[in-house]
Image (spheres, helix red, strand yellow):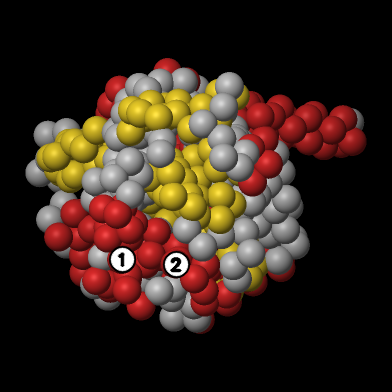
Amino acid sequence: MRKCIVLLSFLGVIRAVSAQLEEVRRMSKILCSSEFHGRGYVNHGDSIAARFLENEFNKIGVKYLTGQQSYFQSFAHNVVTFPDAMELVINRDTLIPGIDFMVDPNSGSSNQTWKTLKLTTEDLFSENLKTRFYSSRIKDQESINSCIIDIRALQGDSLKKVKIELIPTLAQQLHVLVITDDKFTFSVGNEPFSYSLIYIKGNKYQEKARIYTNIHATFVQNYLSTNVVGMIPGIKKTKQTIVLSAHYDHLGKMGAKTYFPGANDNASGVAMLLELARYYAKNPVNYNIVFIAFAGEEAGLLGSSYFVQYPWLKLEDIHFLINLDIMGSGEEGITVVNATLHPEKFEQLSSINKQFNYLPIIKQRGKAANSDHYWFSERGVPAFFIYTMGPNKNYHDIYDTYENLSFSKFIPISELLKKFINGF
């Protein structure tokens, strides 16, 4: 009889975990779907995601923060978008956005046949750059409207200088095509170049080819984005608060057909945020737990910066903040940013992991301005930024899809976090 009870109890746990993971998968899949347009700024994908999260918070039972009448904290910012035309033709080959070529996030528009000047390495590092060397060259050849740069042979500081300094300078003077074999990654721009800047895979470029582009870039000023903020009040009235956060925005679209699903970054982190919200709605603790889904992270940590400037709760009341990103794998453990700033808390987290054997490793890392924890840390709020490590290396590209999420350690990580949070 006792064995039967134990078996039934074990089967009950298995069913509960299965249901839990199924809900996590459902949330992630919805957030990655094409209806959300990459949770960016084309077709207001981020606003669609914000309204979805509003509904989920409400269903879970997450409350408004004291004194607020909504989950929404809105702020305005500038952004470069690519809402429709995204075409690059080499001779008769129409290339595929995100696979064969990628525009720079700050690229300008381009609708023309290119009449190019191919620049040499000697040209790139000419001291005459600061005296508008390239413009002078173009004036001598009035038909030139663009240039081609091959960066495949460059390395180290030379490559860094060309990418960070020289190429953006060129894109303010003429259209630029950069030949590269580097992995394509996209981002969010907010300072548009005067001309188009395009990166092309080396195997897709053809010497002396006819190049045609039709790229539509739109600079949107005072675009309205929204942090989604709620709380589970403590069992007893208290000011002491734990904040759990994850950014829900992603890169959006690059043209009408190409979008960035942002599965690992950061639909998976939002799924973890919602999983913890469901748990604490049913199992409240002695302190308040505030949940923040940040907007504008990919555009420069804008949502968290705004929240810290105009906080909905006193920052000194935040006992600890845990920021969650890239929660979709974990086969190789997790990394904890700010671990060296808070060694006692890191040791507490590590001890729980050793006791229950949740993860193969918890790697400590120092201070870094790489996610929404940063602005809180700068204001003296104790904070960890936690992300998973694993074989899924898809990041800021079109391959960061729901199908590529393993969720291998999602449940163990959620259990680790619950025990860590419950220990405050």
Residue in the picture at 57% in, 40% down: 208
Mark 1 surroundings within 10 Å by alpha-carbon count, few (fewer than 14), some (14 through 19), many (20 or more): some
Q: Position of residue 56 (x, y in %)?
A: 37, 27
The amino acid pointed to by label 1 is: Phe
Quarter of image, res 93: top right
Q: Nearer the viewer, residue 414 or 249?
A: 249
Residue wearing tag 2:
123
The amino acid pointed to by label 2 is: Asp
Q: Position of residue 389 (x, y in %)?
A: 65, 57
| Mark identifier at residue 107 | none
Disc 2/disc 1 C-alpha distance (Å): 9 Å
Of labels 2 and 1, earlier in sequence is 2
Q: Is residue 73 visible?
A: no
Residue in the picture at 45% in, 29% down: 212
Residue in the picture at 78% in, 30% down: 11
Q: Given contact means CB atoms under 8 Å apart, are the residues at marks 2 and 1 in contact? A: yes
| Mark identifier at residue 133 | 1
Q: Position of residue 297 (x, y in %)?
A: 34, 50
Assign a secondary structure to mark 1: helix
Quarter of image, res 82: top left
Quadrant in the picture for the C terminus: bottom left
Assign a secondary structure to mark 2: helix
Q: Position of residue 15 (x, y in %)?
A: 71, 27
Quadrant in the picture for the N terminus: top right
Q: Residue furthest top?
A: 35
Q: Nearer the viewer, residue 300 or 126?
A: 126
Up the image or down, 379 lies above or below 196; here it is below
